[in-house]
Amino acid sequence: MANSDSQVPGHFTVIGDVRFDTNTGWLLSPTDSARLTSKEQEVLLILHKEFGKVVYKEALFERLYYGEDKKPDPKIIDIFMFKIRKKLAKVSQMVVIETHWGRGHELVVKQSPGPSVH
């Protein structure tokens, strides 16, 4: 598993082959870009902070909505994961969010494939 903790000067975090602009929410790669909503940014930052660990769905929900009187249905986490995965897939094949059924989610950076041998 690759490390995701690289910092680029300014407000960028590098996750695998993706630069994540934490001020604007843009996911940037050499070939494409996608923009996260503010809540999607929060989710990705939480997963990034806990890189290499499974973040329990309930804990993620509480971190996103702590102190708020009116909370959405907890299934909103599934919607966030769907949308973030779709945007990550647009910019990278290396950076993925894995689901650990019955537990939670984990941000993973897959190794890039090596050169093919014929």
Image (cartoon, rainbow, N blue to C red):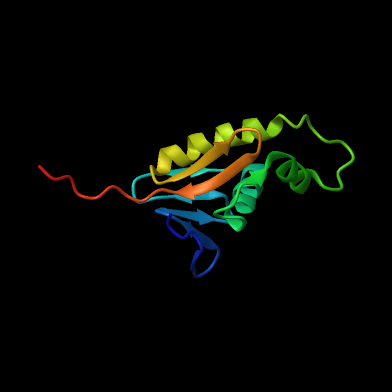
Residue at image location 67% in from the left, 35% down from the top = 77
Q: Visible in this render: residue 7?
A: yes
Residue 101 placement: quadrant: top right
* Residue 103 percent across, percent down from the top left: 65, 38
Q: Is residue 44 left or right of residue 29?
A: right
- How many callouts does the rendering have? 0
Q: Position of residue 35 (x, y in %)?
A: 53, 43
Regarding residue 38, the answer to whether it shows in the image is no
Comparing 106 with 44, the one in front is 106
Q: Residue furthest bottom?
A: 9
**Residue name at image x 87 percent, y 36 percent:** 70
Which residue is depicted at the point 56% across and 34% down?
83
- The location of residue 105, given as percent across then percent down, is 60, 41
Instruction: Say which quarter of the image contains residue 92.
Output: top left
115 left or right of 40 in image: left
Screen quadrant of the C terminus: top left
Which part of the image, by quadrant, shows the N terminus? Answer: bottom left
- At a point 49% along the width and 48% down the height, the residue shown is 108
> Is 31 left, or right, of 9 in this rendering?
left
Residue found at the far right of this picture: 69
Where residue 10 appears, as percent x and y from the top left, is 53, 68
Residue lying farthest to the left in this orientation: 118
